[in-house]
């Protein structure tokens, strides 16, 4: 007899009993709100008058935040730069209930910042300030050690790959190997078109284009 899949609302309620370990690329999303009322005399471009701004967790940080918001007990592991944006990420994560986080800092790395300028409900421009580079060997080993020691206490591993360099192909493969060894399901939010490193995962949440 086939099992009957419960409705989505029932599945969401069950998340309050879930314990999820999430690892991936953190992004600091900055939204700058203002007005555009004139064109610059220096060049044919709009003059953006800043009125306010807002910071939010993006990338894997948004994934982990949403899991916590749905009631799951969440452990989040990521890498930031030794910079002001990294400190902002730490402050935002501290305010999230049901979440324990380990933020590994690399001095030469710039924390990813995506800044969106919005006027009249319309996004005018986006700027990206970030380091897109593979993490150091020592950082990778630290992540593996953290996952290996903690995963037994969680129900699922979520790999949130935003192609910023935290999740190297070799690290992904080793994370999947650790999870499979102790029979923990793995969910991957992928990037790019090469899905080879994700071989063996239980669920891949690609969008239609991917």
Image (tube, rainbow, N blue to C red):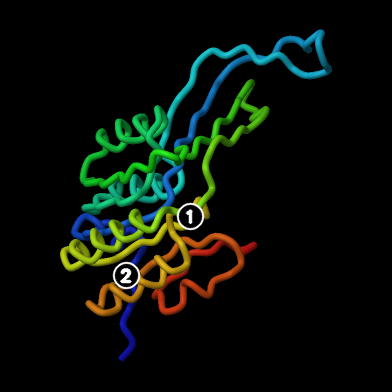
Image x and y of residue 43, in percent: 82, 15
What residue is drawn where x is 59% and y is 16%?
34
Residue tagged by mark 2? 6
Image mark for residue 157 = none
Residue of label 1:
134
CA gap, disc 2 and disc 1: 41 Å
Task: Say left or right for 104 vs 120.
Answer: left
Q: Position of residue 134 (x, y in %)?
A: 48, 55
Quarter of the image for residue 138 reads bottom left
Instruction: State which tag comes first along the sequence, 2 or 1.
Output: 2
Whether 44 is drawn above or below 197: the answer is: above
Q: In front of the other: label 2 or label 1?
A: 1
In percent of width and height, residue 103 lies at 30, 44
Circles 2, 1 touching at the beta carbon (< 8 Å): no
Residue 44 percent across, percent down from the top left: 83, 18
Please count the marks in the image. 2
Question: For mark 1, does the 10 Å Cα neighbourhood hold few (<14), some (14 to 19), or many (20 or more) residues?
Answer: some
Residue at 22% x, 65% y is: 151
Note whether 200 is above or below 93 in the view shown.
below
Taking depth in this image into account, of 197 and 51 the one nearest to the observer is: 197
Asked whether, in this view, residue 95 is left or right of residue 36, the answer is left
Q: For the residue labelled by badge 1, is the local secondary structure a helix, a strand or a loop?
A: loop
């Amino acid at each position: 007899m086939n099992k009957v899949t419960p409705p989505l609302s029932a599945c969401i309620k069950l998340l309050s009993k879930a314990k999820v370990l999430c690892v991936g690329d953190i992004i600091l999303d900055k939204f700058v709100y203002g007005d555009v009322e004139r064109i610059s005399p220096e060049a044919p471009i709009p003059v953006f008058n800043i009125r306010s701004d807002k910071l939010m967790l993006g990338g894997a940080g948004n994934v982990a935040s949403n899991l916590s918001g749905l009631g799951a007990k969440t452990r989040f592991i990521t890498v930031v730069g030794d910079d002001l944006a990294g400190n902002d990420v730490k402050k935002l994560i501290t305010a999230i209930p049901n979440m324990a986080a380990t933020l590994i800092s690399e001095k030469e790395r710039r924390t990813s910042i995506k800044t969106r300028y919005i006027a009249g409900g319309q996004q005018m421009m986006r700027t990206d300030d970030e380091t897109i580079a593979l993490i150091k060997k020592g950082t990778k080993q630290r992540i593996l050690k953290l996952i290996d020691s903690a995963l037994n206490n969680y129900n699922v591993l979520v790999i949130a790959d935003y192609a910023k360099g935290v999740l190297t192909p070799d690290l992904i493969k080793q994370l999947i190997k650790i999870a499979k060894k102790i029979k923990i399901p793995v969910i991957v939010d992928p990037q790019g078109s090469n899905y080879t490193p994700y071989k063996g995962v239980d669920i891949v949440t690609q969008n239609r284009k991917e």
